[in-house]
Image: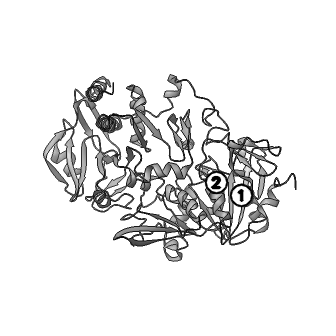
Amino acid sequence: MGHGKVVNVSDALSVIKDGDVVAISGFNLSTAPEYLILELFEQYKKTGHPNNLFIISDTLPAVADRGLDKVFGELYQDKDQKFIRGTLMPFIGWSPALMKMTLENRIEVYSFAIGTTSYWFREVASNRPGLLSKVGIGTFLDPRIDGGASNEIAKEKKTCKVDVLTINGEEWLLYQAPTPDVTLIRGTTADEDGNISMEEEGIYGTVLNMAQAAKALPNQGKVICQVKYVARKDTIPTREVIVPAPLIDYVVVAPDAEKYHKISGSYVYDPRLAGHVKAKKTKELEELLPAPNQIRDRIAAGRILIEVMKTAAKLKKPLFGNLGIGIPVYASWLAGELGLSNLLALTVEPGPIGGIALVGPDFGVAISPQAIIPMPDMFTNYEGGIIDFAALGFMEIDSKGNLNPSYSSTKVSGPGGFPVISSGSPRTFFAGGFTAGKFDIDAAKGKLIIKSDGNILKFNEKIVKIVFSGPQAVKAKKEILYVTERAVFGLNENGLILKEIAPGVDLEKDILAKMNFKPQIANKLETMPECLFHPSLDPLKEHIDDILEEAGLI
């Protein structure tokens, strides 16, 4: 059985019984106990046990063909699989097989927001009934719509559910799910007593709270931790212990870090990602930020950056914020190109603040962050409106300003962090192309040139799924902007209102004819800044410098 709590993998996993609720940490591969996940599945394949499991994660412990996606890839081929009966996963976009199983109604699938699920572990660990939040009112998370259920079997079974409560005349949502019988987490080093440190991890994620959730009354369960190393008793420095020994039942050493214990999708370990060294800024590092390959996307990103810098000028300080995937990421690239990065302290959902946030399978970690905090605490910054702004992508918008960032009839990726960030931030700037499909759009001499347009309309009277509620944002007096390469919309009590159009476009032909509803139009319709519509970035830099100089920020 090894030293103390350090045991072989089969002994540790033997505590998981048929029908158990199993919590598994992991934001993509960061903090994902991949060895435990794959060995648990191997045990099922050999013996048929444990079966009928319900899996809950703080995000999704997977990237393509790794972790849980590898498991679901095999389960999808087995029409009679009995391994997993259902999941609560805030994001399933990295697992095409799980998305297919969701659409085919093969298992129960629920998707609360990442911040909701992450903080839910903290709440149930405190023996509270669930998480009370305003996030999700008026969206698919609202029980009057889908209650976070991603398919019909989930709507019917309600293993995870959301209730509407009224407190002091205001509506709140109570998020509930079954508490874990067993939690699988990951750290870097365990001592022989079971104290866990995380020095070679890129995030802390939710591992401490997930361990606590399994240990809370009335259903005290087991916690198994995957590590790289075992240290002698009492040799991990006190302040480096993230999960103390009393919360740990078993420790399992991953036999191969490359195979089972990567800091992110592409890296086994990197001191810049773990916060051990601050890398010198180089052109090579800056090139890790995705640059737009379409001028259409650069225009929208530039308009977002102008709005962000106007906010910095108004508040007279550098901004604390979040840039989502899609066009908003290009705003970060633009800020670097224009020498404005020092005015932005940008966050990544699972915990890094500052640095260069990575994308794709490495999303979740950052090179040389100035700080790394636990994921529930990061989402407190979002839900509490502690950040100054958020810029997020969109797929569809309706006349009320409701928004769908990622769902289609064939894609159920889950909401990710979007509902918490968009509803909590005091200012949210959404960005996307005005249409979708094949297009040919250019800009020159301060004007937008639409040679051919996308044939898929994105401004629709009915959208596939409401993930952001326009009416709730108006009620909460949030500052909302919807930015595209040819039009900028605001939001008021009557819904979407057109405020700016690009120079060179025709209001009727290029905007209103490409919408499935007629928006309100501002009495004084402005022109988008001409500095956005040049091949060179120099006019944009001059425009932003003028804004900042007037505020005394440069």
- Expressed as whole percent of the image width and height from the top left, the position of residue 131 reads 50, 64
Image check: 251 left or right of 162? right
Q: State the mark number for residue 339.
A: none
Residue at (69%, 47%) from the top-left corner?
187
Q: Is disc 2 surrounded by few (<14), some (14 to 19) or many (20+) residues within 10 Å?
A: many
Q: Which residue is mark 1?
A: 247
Q: Tell me whether circle 1 and circle 2 mark residues in contact (CB < 8 Å).
A: yes
**Snapshot quadrant of residue 264:** top right
Image check: 6 left or right of 392? right
The residue most toward the bottom is: 156
**Snapshot quadrant of residue 552:** top left
Q: What amino acid is found at the position of numbered circle 1 in the picture?
A: Leu
415 or 535: nearer the viewer: 415
- Expressed as whole percent of the image width and height from the top left, the position of residue 364 reads 54, 44
Image check: 226 left or right of 172? right
Instruction: Label 2, secondary structure: give it.
Output: helix
- Expressed as whole percent of the image width and height from the top left, the position of residue 446 reads 22, 29
The residue most toward the left is: 523
- Expressed as whole percent of the image width and height from the top left, the position of residue 539 reads 27, 25
- Position of 106 relative to 206 (above/below): below
Q: What amino acid is found at the position of numbered circle 2 in the picture?
A: Leu
Q: Is disc 1 surrounded by few (<14), some (14 to 19) or many (20+) residues within 10 Å?
A: many
Residue at (26%, 59%) from the top-left corner?
400
Pick whichever of labels 1 and 2 is earlier in the sequence. Answer: 2
Q: Quadrant of the N terminus?
A: bottom right
| Residue 214 visible in the current orientation | yes
Residue at (65%, 54%) from the top-left corner?
70
109 or 105: nearer the viewer: 109
Q: Which residue is mark 2?
A: 208
Instruction: Label 1, secondary structure: give it.
Output: helix
430 or 424: nearer the viewer: 424
| Residue 25 visible in the current orientation | no
